Amino acid sequence: MNNDINTSNPPTRFSPKVKALTCPSCGAGIDLKVPDSITVVCGSCGSIIDLKANGFNIALAGKINLSIKPIIPLGSRGKLKGILWEVIGFMKRRDPQYSVYWDEYLLFNPRYGYKWLTEYKGHWNFISTIKLKPKASNIVLSQHRISVDLLNHKYFLYGRGLAEVTHVLGEFYWRVKVGDEVQTEDYIDPPYMLSRETDQSENIWSLGEYIESEKIGERFQVSELLPAELGVSPNQPSPHNDGFTSLLAVWAIFVGILIFFQFMHLSSAQSKEVYSNSFSLLPQEKYNVKASDWSATLFNRKTFPSIAIPSKTSDKTNNEFSTNSFELKGGKSTVEIHLSAPVDNNGLYISGELINEEKGLAYPIDQTIEYYHGVSGGESWSEGSNQSSLLLSSIPDGKYRLDFETSTYPEGSVISPINVSIKRATPLWSNFLWSLILISLPFLWRYSLRYSFEVQRWEESDFSPYASSEE
Amino acid sequence: MFKLLCPACGGEVVFKSKASIFVVCTYCKSSLLRQDLNLELYGKMAELQEDLTPFQIGTKGYWSKNPFELLGRLRMSWDDGYWNEWYVLFGDGQEGWLAEAQGFYSICLEDKDSPILDRDDIKVGARFDFKDSNNSLLDFLNKGEYEVCDIKEVICIGSEGELPFTAPKGRKSTSIDLNSNDGKFACIEYHEDGNRLFVGEYIEFDDFGFTNLRDIEGW
């Protein structure tokens, strides 16, 4: 027994067993390709013949103009999805609301039944009726993003409309009449499209897949020129999707590497010292500061006359200082304030402000330097250190000075001098930014192509996710 | 399998299913009724019209690894078309039906335990739950809802081979198809001799692993 339909070489001549009948209108012979057909159009006079009227009678059901010829002739055979199909029927349908027309070809194979080929604006779809019923999605993204689920695919509503038969040729497995109208709904997940056709008695779902025009011409050996593809069809696969995810991955990896190196750079960025000085602290009311800071100290003394309260200042060191002005440059960045003092079983508390002299902004600081050591229980111990540093981040450029005051503990400790060093981090951002732009260019280019393709795809839809909200 | 002789022509009539009670003689097309080992002439069956079916009596296939063979067929007609119901015998002795309509294939078993819905409750689009079915053979079908897809007034326009009930030309019934949204299928047949419920599923042609298919001229 031959278990396989001979699909290796579609025969150009074949002689299927056909059921013959006579046209009740013109008397011409009509050969049925499929004995189960219910409707056939007489190729001689254009009569639409109902083959199963009131049971098993033959009746006229209309007449069509035979001047309209399908691009793929009836009787053509071609292989799609590995199966040989014969074109047995042709319909023109339109949406009367928009005067949009499209063509539909009914395909037949005795083992695999019926399929459809549709053509609209040069775009083709291969369509199967399905018995599965798609489910409305639980997740409703918005009023205009309606979707249904079928076999783990999500399909988004593209359009709703009407489909009216305006022309028929060949034979069909149901009753076809010119003027038959159904309501349609199309949902897309390119290259697939789920469609629903509804009339008073039925609710039929079908699943279509986009097929390249060249394939149709080649498989069905169409001699006529196929209509040119116009625009982007609803479920046309985007040519910009090929490799887009790998491009995205490569881009993400490069950006990741770039960010990693920039972090490395930031953490090791060369710091530049912008100020350095030593301040002497003496346990007396008279301040002993370096000559360069003398005036500032004097000024501060006037503002904060701690000398006026000798009782408090006499028994503990309490000094107030101001550094000279220094310039911070190189763009908003980190400032490191490094403080050190010869503490030895005592501590020094420093509080103050980094002051932007031009804008009057102040960044408070608060540091303790303490160092303790000794021997207890026969073991020596130590705690703390004689230096301390703090980072102030995002400090803009400008002219600055550091005001601070100190206090020592235990009371009466003599700790001097305090060394103050201020450093400005000078990271480079320009290399990073330029690299980022260069790396991102090909990605952005592909992204914009892909985006504009999607915008075009949804152009004719009332449910476009790209539509500007006009309502 | 057992063999009897046709009372009309004396030809050999082969029975593969013990449940078959109706048979069309392959030689003289007489339809015969069987009672135990006795065959009785019932009528004459006209030659079935050519319909491009890929099957024939003796075609073999599998339903989830369970082998089956086609023993007989009913040719059905309704207002809007035709289809074939093939009587199927499984390797384990179970009987079933393979429906063939416009390239869709559904295979089913009779559910003899579940209550049958009242004909008056059935409308296209109505939904029913078969969870109450206590037929363990059909456990895999006992989940989810079924929706009534169509209600057809059916007439048998011919039959061939062996069949488990009297299936003369002109036998009338009401056939209701129900689909679940995951490819399961149920069918209720309302007939004057009794109502029956079948449950099964839609399967792609290639997934049956058919052998001994009919040659179709031109294809």
Image: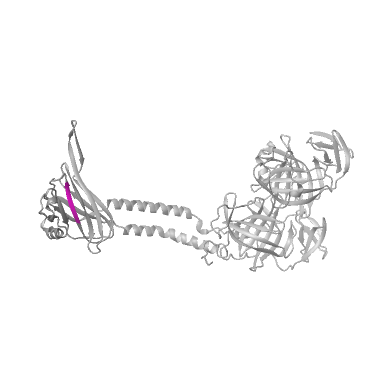
Dominant SS of magenta comes to strand
Q: Nearer the viewer, residue A186 or A281?
A: A281
Displayed quadrant of residue B5 = top right
Q: Position of residue B185 (x, y in %)?
A: 69, 46
Q: Which of A362 and A334 is in front in this view?
A: A362
Q: List x then y, in percent, for residue A358.
A: 23, 64
Residue A72 in view, yes or no: no
* Location of the C terminus of chain A (image quadrant): bottom right
How far across and down, in percent of the image, does residue A83 sit?
66, 51
Q: Residue placed at 73% from the left, 52% from the top?
A: B123
A212 over B161 or under it: above or below:
below
- Labels in figure, total: 0
* The N terminus of chain A sits in image quarter: top right
Q: In this view, does A171 lie to the left or right of B3?
A: left
Q: Looking at the picture, does residue A271 appear above or below residue A452?
A: above
Color style of the picture: one colour
* Left or right: where B97 falls relative to A372: right
Q: Nearer the viewer, residue B144 or A466?
A: B144
Within the magenta stretch, is there residue A407? yes
State the extent of the magenta-drawn residues as a range.
Answer: A403-408
* Residue B186 image position (x, y, % from top left): 71, 45
Quadrant in the rendering for residue A145: bottom right
